[in-house]
């Protein structure tokens, strides 16, 4: 699908605009937006395609989009900074930092090997399914 790209991009960030356009041309993106701030200044603000492919509604400058799993790299970076400062032991059980996690029957993992979905939680922190026992039953 080819889509008109709207918005603006400062010349120094032309590769961002090119990659954004390729998303439609080469990877079949339906609708998308990207914004880049540098030192508090908006340097890229692009959008294009369809916000709703069923009714054909175009993506606009203020279209609201779901953002799934975007915090994981930032959480990982923060965890590594804390580990570097000696404030987080990546090999410690999760329950050392989250006591409620250390309930009987729970498969205790170290902090470094856990992720919300692997730990029996949805990304929102609400359990999405019961923990499995060592026999594999719920």
Image (spheres, rainbow, N blue to C red):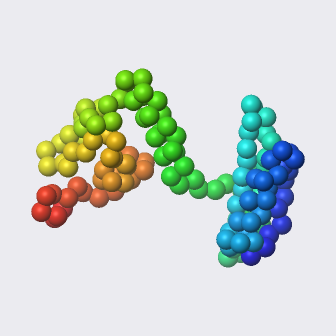
Which residue is painted at 67% across and 76% down in the image? 54
9 is higher (above) or lower (below) than 19:
above
Q: Is 95 placed left or right of 66 in the picture?
A: left
User: Percent position (x, y) of residue 35?
Assistant: 73, 47
Please name whichever residue, 91 or 93, is drawn nearer the observer in this view of the structure: 91
Who is closer to the viewer here, 18 or 40? Answer: 18
Looking at the rendered image, the quarter that the N terminus falls into is bottom right
Which of 114 and 47 lies nearest the eye of the viewer? 114
Look at the image and tell me in which quarter the C terminus lies.
bottom left
**Residue 69 seen in this snapshot:** yes
Left or right, 137 with respect to 16, comes to left
Q: Report the residue at 68% width, 73% height from top.
A: 28
In the picture, residue 82 is in which quadrant?
Answer: top left
Residue pictured at 43% horizontal, 48% vertical: 124
The vertical placement of 116 against 47, above or below, is above
Q: Is residue 116 above or below residue 58?
A: above
Q: Is residue 61 visible?
A: no
Location of residue 36 (image quadrant): top right
Whether residue 10 is situated above or below residue 77 in the rendered picture: below
User: Residue at image x 20%, y 40%?
Assistant: 102
């Amino acid at each position: 699908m080819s889509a008109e790209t709207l918005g603006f991009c400062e010349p120094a960030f032309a590769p961002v605009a090119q990659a954004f356009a390729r998303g439609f041309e080469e990877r079949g993106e339906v609708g998308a937006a990207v914004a880049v701030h540098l030192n508090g200044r908006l340097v890229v603000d692009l959008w294009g395609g369809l916000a709703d492919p069923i009714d054909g509604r175009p993506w606009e400058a203020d279209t609201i989009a779901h953002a799934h799993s975007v915090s994981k790299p930032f959480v990982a970076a923060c965890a590594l900074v804390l580990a570097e400062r000696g404030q987080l032991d990546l090999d410690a059980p999760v329950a050392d930092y989250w006591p409620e996690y250390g309930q009987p029957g729970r498969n205790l993992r170290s902090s470094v090997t856990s992720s919300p979905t692997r730990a029996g939680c949805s990304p929102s922190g609400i359990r999405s399914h019961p923990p499995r026992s060592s026999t594999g039953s719920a």
